[in-house]
Amino acid sequence: MTAEVTTEATTDKASPAESNADNTSKPSPTLTNNVQGSDKQSETPKKDAPTDFETAMEVAGFGLFNYLLIIAALPAAIATVVETSTMSYILPSAECDLKLTLLDKGLLNAITYAGMISSAILWGYMADTKGRKKLLIFGYLSNIISVLGGACSQNVIQLMVFKYISGFIMCGPFAVLMSYLTELHGKRFRSRIVMLMGIMFSVGNISLPLVALSVLPRNWDFQILGLQFHSWQVFLAISAIPSLLGGTLLSFFPESPKFLMSQGRNAEALRVFQKIYALNSRKPRTDFPIKELINETQNAEKESNASTASIATIESVVPKEKENEPASKVSLKEKKPKVSLRQGWEQLRPLLSKPYLGLSIRVYLMNFAILFGQNTLRLWVPQMFASIEEYEQMYGTAGATMCTILEYSVNKTQLINNELTNLRMEKCEVVVTPASYTNNITVAVCSLVGYCFAGFVVNRIGSKMLLTIGSTVAGLCAIGLYFSISSLSTSIIVSISVTMGSISAMSILSSSVDLFPTSLRTMIVSLAMMFGRVGSIMGNILFPIFMSLGCVPPFIMLTFVMWSAGIMSAFLPNTRKMVLK
C-alpha cells in the first residue's frame, strides 16, 4: 500500500483565522480539468473563490487512489456478506451436532440481524458525528473476537449469543462503508460505486460457498483445550479473515472529506483532496489548484434560521459561552453527556419532520419489504439445495418437485429431533456432499454478472427504475419456485430472484445516499437497514412456519413483499446525477 494514502493525525477543527492563513498563503491558479476517464470538463471557478465538494472531488480526479480504495474495500464488503450468511451454510452440517429444530434454523439465520437492529441508531449517530474511518477500523477488527467466539461454541445458545454480538458490531461498518465510499467519489461515479459494492458482495457470495465446498463436507472431529470442534466450526473461524483484512487495509486511507467539510474542518478536508489529487495525477500535492473550500457549517446555519427542518451540526450545540472561541479550542473533554445526547437528538430530529419525514418512511418500508424477501430466500437457498441434493440421491429425480422436497426436508428435521429427544438414536448423520454447494456458486456468479450489468445501466435508467424492475422480477421468480420440477430449474429461478433482489437492495441504498444530506446520510442508511433487518428477522422466522403449513404459503409471502416494494418505488424522487447535499 502506498504510504501517501495514509492519513495524517486528525486535528481539531481549524479556526477561521487559521483557515484564512492557509487559504491566502498562495495565489489560486486557474482551475484545469484533471479528471481522468471523463469526456466532460469541469467548470472553472473564479480565482480565489471557495470551492464546493463536488468540484473539488472532480479536480482531484479518478485514478490510482480510487483503485486502491476499491481493493481495500473488497475484503470489508466480503466481511459483511460473510457475517450475515455463514449460518445458512452450516445448518445442514451442524444440524446433528447442535440438535437443531426447524425454528432453530430460522433463528440462527435471523439472530445476526437482531444484533444489527439493536445498534443501528448508535452506529448512525457515531458515524455522522465522530467520523467514518475510525469506526470502520474499530468495527471490523473488533468483530474478529465475536466470530472466533462463535467458532468455539458448543451448543446452539452459545452460537446465538456470539452471532448476536457479531451483528451488533457489524451493523456499523456496513452503513459506514457505504457512506465512506460514496463520499470519496464525485457524482459522476457515485452510482457506479454503489453498484460496484454490489459486485463486491457478489464476490463474497461466491467465495463463501467455495470455502464451504472445501471445508464442510469433511468429517473433522477434534478437541482443543477440552472444546470439541467439527468442520462447521473451522468454517466459522476462517470467516474472520475478511474482517481482519478489511480493518487493516482501510486504516491506510483518510477520513471522508465530505464529512470533514460538514464539520467545518476544511483545512483537513483540503489535505485529503490534495492526497487524492497527488496519487491520481502523479503530481505534487501543492499543485492541487483549489486553495479554499466553502464553509458548509455557515450554510447549515443559514438553513437553520430559514427552516425548522434544518440539519444540526456539532457547532450548533456548543455552549453559548464557547460560541466566540475558535472551534479548535473547544475540547472534546468539555462535551458533557447531555450535550452528546442533544447532538444525537438534533441529528435525528430532521428525519421526524418535514421535508424528510415522508421520504424517510418510504425508504424504511421499501427496505423492510426488499430485505424481507431477499434475505429470506438467500439464506434458505443453501438449505434448499442441500435438501434437493440429498433427496435426489436417495429417491432420484422423478417427481422431485419443490413441494415434495420441502415436505421431505421438514419431515426429516422433525424426525431427527424426535428421535434424539426420545434417545432412540445414538448418533445423527447428515449427508453433506460437495454437490450441495455447487448450485450456490452458480447463484453467486449470476449475482456478480447481474451487478456488472446494473453498474453499466444505472446511469442510463437511474436507481429508481432499476429498483422497480428488480423488485418486480424478484417477486415473479419467488412464486415461480412453486412450479420448479428439478434442481436445474430451481437453480435458474433462484439465481434470477436473488440477483434481482440484491440489485433492488443496492438501488434503494443508492437512492438514499442521494436523497439525504451529509449529516444525515449514515443515519438514514442505518435506520433504513434497521427496518430492513427487521424484515429479515421476520422473514426467516415466518418462512419455516409457513413451510410447516404447506408448500404455497412461503412463496406467496415472498412475492407479496417484493411486489409491495416495487409499487412503493414508483413514488420515489428521481436521483439521476443528483448533487450530494
Image (tube, helix red, strand yellow):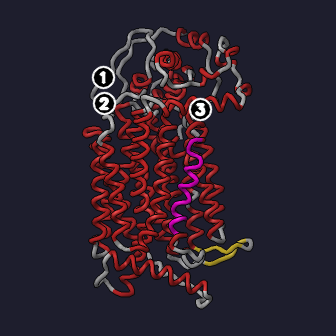
Point out the tag, 2 or 3, that comes first from the N-terminus.
2
Q: Which sits in the foreground, 278 or 257?
A: 257
Within-10-Å neighbours for mark 2: few <14, some 14–19, many 20+: few
Q: Quadrant of residue 165?
A: bottom right
Q: Nearer the viewer, mark 1 or mark 3?
A: 3
Q: Nearer the viewer, residue 429 or 4?
A: 429
Task: Give me the C-alpha separation between circle 2 and circle 3.
Answer: 41 Å
Q: Would you say 370 lies left or right of 298 here?
A: left
Tag 1: amino acid: Gln
- How many C-alpha atoms fall within 10 Å of the one at disc 1: few (<14), some, or many (≥20)? few
Q: Say whether residue 321 is visible.
A: yes
* Residue for badge 1: 41
Q: Is residue 7 above or below residue 325?
A: below
Principal SS element in the magenta part? helix
Labelled pair 2, 1 in contact (Cβ < 8 Å): yes
Q: Quadrant of residue 377?
A: bottom left
What residue is pinned by disc 2?
38
Q: Which residues are magenta?
A: 105-121
Indicate the amino acid at tag 3.
Trp
